[in-house]
């Protein structure tokens, strides 16, 4: 068996492959590691045939949909997954055939309703159902401490104690454990009476994961993250430096329209001398009125450089092929001591 564990902060994902057939699957891939996964597959000489999420993640962005688009391979999840882009929905007791390997599905709801574990040879990929020294939380959407108790004590923990446990998360640098070790040392598994376990899970009072709303939105719907939108926009537009813009403003060049896409109050507190105001939220509605000549060179700026990048991409999509974005924003412009003009828009 070909096996690689990839850590991204506390997130763990896995490349599992059949050495005889060179067929592989990615389990719980994370969006920022796409190039790493593809490089690993090339190094190991395997072809990624399946992309598997053990559950709907709430604390990071899944790479399954994007990798499926690039590789033209199916996304696999439990049949209770709400994600519309899932190609193969599995039920308890079913298997994924990966060359000579068999990935057996164990439905383990509790952390989420669609949580599943995957057993292959001497190991089990437990997602967030069982962690090293912990368990998945049950206070996120579709979480259920009663279901988690059953999934753990009546199913997962009855497997061979020697099975290696590979979870979807670990924040202490540990690679794996075993079923037996977790039964013996995992603090949460010492509460073996249903009522005690359920009460413990309900009293954890854990902080919410960073970006939980965005992660759930994108992982459940297949929509794009803000970072992905920015990356896509950044790849499609050219930029101008702060120093270059300063030089052009001081030279009083009239071939460049500086377009401030912030809101009016921010603009009036201080803007690049000569800049026009066109808030991003009104861009599409006012562009014909405020920018009648699509051949003009337009530089978009905002407070931090993000919204102006999106605005520039929109302008280019609308036919303003000479639109560019400021590399940075008005915050950096002010900090550099470059000229500002306060007051209302002309």
Image (cartoon, rainbow, N blue to C red):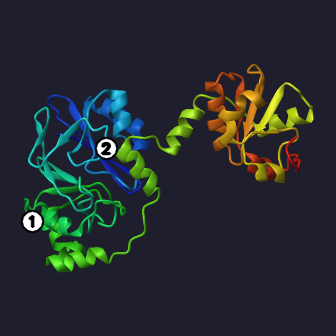
**Label 2 crowd (10 A; few <14 / some 14-19 / many >=20):** some
- Dot 2 falls on a residue whose secondary structure is loop
Query: What x and y, as percent, mark residue 206?
Result: 38, 71
Give the residue displayed 20% in from the left and 41% down from the top: 89
Q: Are marks 1 and 2 in contact (CB under 8 Å)?
A: no
- Dot 1 falls on a residue whose secondary structure is loop
In which quarter of the view is residue 311 placed?
top right
Query: What x and y, as percent, mark residue 264?
Result: 77, 49
In which quarter of the view is residue 289 placed?
top right
Query: What x and y, as percent, mark residue 331?
Result: 75, 51
Q: CA distance from mark 1 to mark 2?
A: 28 Å
Which of the two discs, 1 and 2, labels the residue nearer the N terminus?
A: 2
Q: Is residue 115 above or below residue 246?
A: below
Q: Residue furthest top?
A: 295
Query: What x and y, as percent, mark residue 255?
Result: 85, 24
Instruction: Name the mark nearer the viewer: 1 or 2.
Output: 2
Q: Which part of the image, by quadrant, shows the N terminus?
A: top left
Q: Nearer the viewer, residue 330 or 121?
A: 330
Q: How many marks?
A: 2
Give the residue displayed 33% in from the left and 60% down from the top: 141
Instruction: Return the mark for residue 83.
Output: 2
Q: Which part of the image, by quadrant, shows the C terminus?
A: top right
Q: Nearer the viewer, residue 187 or 40?
A: 187
Q: Residue furthest right?
A: 251
**Residue 192 visible:** no
Q: Identify residue for label 1.
A: 154
Q: Is residue 334 above or below residue 311?
A: below
**Residue 339 visible:** yes
Image side of residue 248 versus residue 329, left or right: right
């Amino acid at each position: 068996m070909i096996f690689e564990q990839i850590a991204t902060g506390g997130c763990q994902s896995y490349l599992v492959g059949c050495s005889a057939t060179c067929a592989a699957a990615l389990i719980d891939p994370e969006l920022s590691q796409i190039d790493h996964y593809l490089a690993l597959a090339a190094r190991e000489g395997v072809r990624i045939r399946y992309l598997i999420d053990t559950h709907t993640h709430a604390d990071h962005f899944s790479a399954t949909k994007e990798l499926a688009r690039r590789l033209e391979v199916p996304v696999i999840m439990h049949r209770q997954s709400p994600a519309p882009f899932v190609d193969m929905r599995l039920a308890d007791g079913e298997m994924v055939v990966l060359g000579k390997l068999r990935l057996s599905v164990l439905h383990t709801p509790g952390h989420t309703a669609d949580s599943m574990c995957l057993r292959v040879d001497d190991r089990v990929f437990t997602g967030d159902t069982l962690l090293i020294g912990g368990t998945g939380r049950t206070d996120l959407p579709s979480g259920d401490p009663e279901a988690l108790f059953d999934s753990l004590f009546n199913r997962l923990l009855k497997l061979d104690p020697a099975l290696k446990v590979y979870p979807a998360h670990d924040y202490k640098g540990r690679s794996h454990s075993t079923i037996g070790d977790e039964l013996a040392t995992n603090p949460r598994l010492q509460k073996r009476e249903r009522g005690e376990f359920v009460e413990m899970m309900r009293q954890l009072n854990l902080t919410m994961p960073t970006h939980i709303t965005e992660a759930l939105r994108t992982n459940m719907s297949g929509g794009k993250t803000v970072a992905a939108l920015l990356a896509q926009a950044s790849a499609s537009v050219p930029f101008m430096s702060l120093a270059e813009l300063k030089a052009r403003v001081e030279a009083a060049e009239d071939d460049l329209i500086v377009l401030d896409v912030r809101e009016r109050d921010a603009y009036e507190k201080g803007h690049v001398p000569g800049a026009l105001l066109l808030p991003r939220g009104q861009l599409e509605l006012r562009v014909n009125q405020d920018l009648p000549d699509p051949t003009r060179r337009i530089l978009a700026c905002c407070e931090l450089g993000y919204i102006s990048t999106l605005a520039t991409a929109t302008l280019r999509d609308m036919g303003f092929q000479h639109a560019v974005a400021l590399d940075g924003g008005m915050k950096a412009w002010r900090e550099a001591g470059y000229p500002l003009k306060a007051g209302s828009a002309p």
